[in-house]
Image: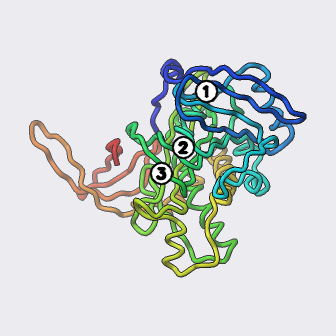
Amino acid sequence: MTCSLSPSAAASGLVPTPYKLIIYGYGLVAELSMACGSPCTLVLCGKSVAENEIAESLLKSNNTLKLPDDVAVSLLLHSESDKPFDEESFGIDSFMNSLSTNRFGRFLLWSPRLTSTHDVVSQNFGVLPIGSVCIADVQYKGRGRSKNVWESPKGCLLFSFTLQMEDGRAVPLVQYVVSLAVTEAIKDICDKNGLPLVDVKIKWPNDLYLNNLKVGGILCTSTYTSKKFNISVGVGLNVDNEKPTTCLNGFLRELSVMTYQFKRKDILAAFFDKFEQFYNLFVDQGFQSLEELYYKTWLHSGQRVIVQEKNEEQLVENVVTVQGLTSSGYLLAIGDDGQMCELHPDGNR
C-alpha cells in the first residue's frame, strides 16, 4: 500500500472545469468546455433514485469534477444518455441490476475512453460518495506500482473505487482483501455457470496470475485528512484481451469452453458483492478472518526465496522460506537457521 498522494499534490495536476448545465426532466447533461485535447464522455449513474439525485445535485451546487486539464469532457446522467455507444461498451444497466451491495459500486462513473480511472476517483474523493466506482473501456494513462504508466486496450476490466478507514494499521491490508475478492468473484461466476474452475492466483503483494501469467493487478493509494484515510483502489483485469500475456476468455477457449464468455459487467458486480462481504469481515474481525482463504489463493506458501543483505561491504545471500504475512502486511519468512525475517516488496515487481 502506498501513501502517495498528499492533499496538495492531489490538487496540483487537475483543475476545476467550467460547465454549462442543461436539465431535461429527470436527467441532465453538463457540457464541459476545455481549451484542448480530444473529447471524452463521463456517464454518471446511481442504483437508486436517491443516488441518481446525487449526480444532479453535484452539478447544481457548482461542485465541478476535477479532470485532466488537457482533455475535453462531457458529463451526462445515464438516464438521459441517448448516444449509441459501442456494443462492446460496459453494460451499465445490467451491472446495476446484478449488484446487491449496500454501499460499494452503487454510484458509477463510466467512460468509453479515459486517461485514468484512478485519477478521477482520487482527485474527486471529497465530492463523490464513498464507494463510488469509475470504469473505463479504454485507459491510456493508467497508473501502476512505482508510478508506472499503463495503456489498457479494449477487453480489460478497468475500474477504481473509493473507501474510507480510520485505523491506519489496517490500510496496508486493504489490497489483499481486494485481491481476494477478485479471485473469489471469478470462482463464483464459474460455479454459477457450470464452468471449469478459472483459478486466478494472488502474487504478493498485488498482482493476479492465471496459468503462471499475469492477468491483472491492484493499486491502492491513500491520503490522510480529518483523522481518516481516504483510499482509492484501482483494479485492472484482462478479460478478453490475450495480449500481452493472457486473459480469462482466452483461458476458457484453451479449455474448449465455447458456450460462455466472461463479461466485465458480471465480474464487476460479483466483485463488489464479494468485496463488501469480505470488507465487513475485515473491519469487524481483522484480516485473520480471511487469512486461511487468502493463503489458499496466493502463490507463496512454502516458497523458497533468496534474500540479499549488505553485511559491511559484502552482499550476502540467504535462502528463506515464506510462512505467511506479518501483522503489518509484509511477508513473514524463516531462514534455514530458524531465524524469522520480514520481507518487503522491491517496489517494481
Residue marked by disc 3: 217
Q: Residues within 10 Å of mark 2 (few under 14, many from 20)?
A: many
x%, y% of residue 39? 59, 35
Circle on res. 234: 2
Identify the residue at horizontal 43%, vertical 44% (top origin). 150
Identify the residue at horizontal 70%, vertical 42% (top origin). 108
One can see residue 200 in this view: yes
x%, y% of residue 232? 57, 37
x%, y% of residue 42? 66, 38
Whole-angstrom CA distance, mark 2 to mark 1, is 19 Å
Circle on res. 228: 1
| Rendered position, 51 above or below 62 | below
Of helix, strand and loop, which one carries label 2?
strand
Nearer-N-terminus badge (3/2): 3
Nearer-N-terminus badge (1/3): 3
x%, y% of residue 119? 54, 33
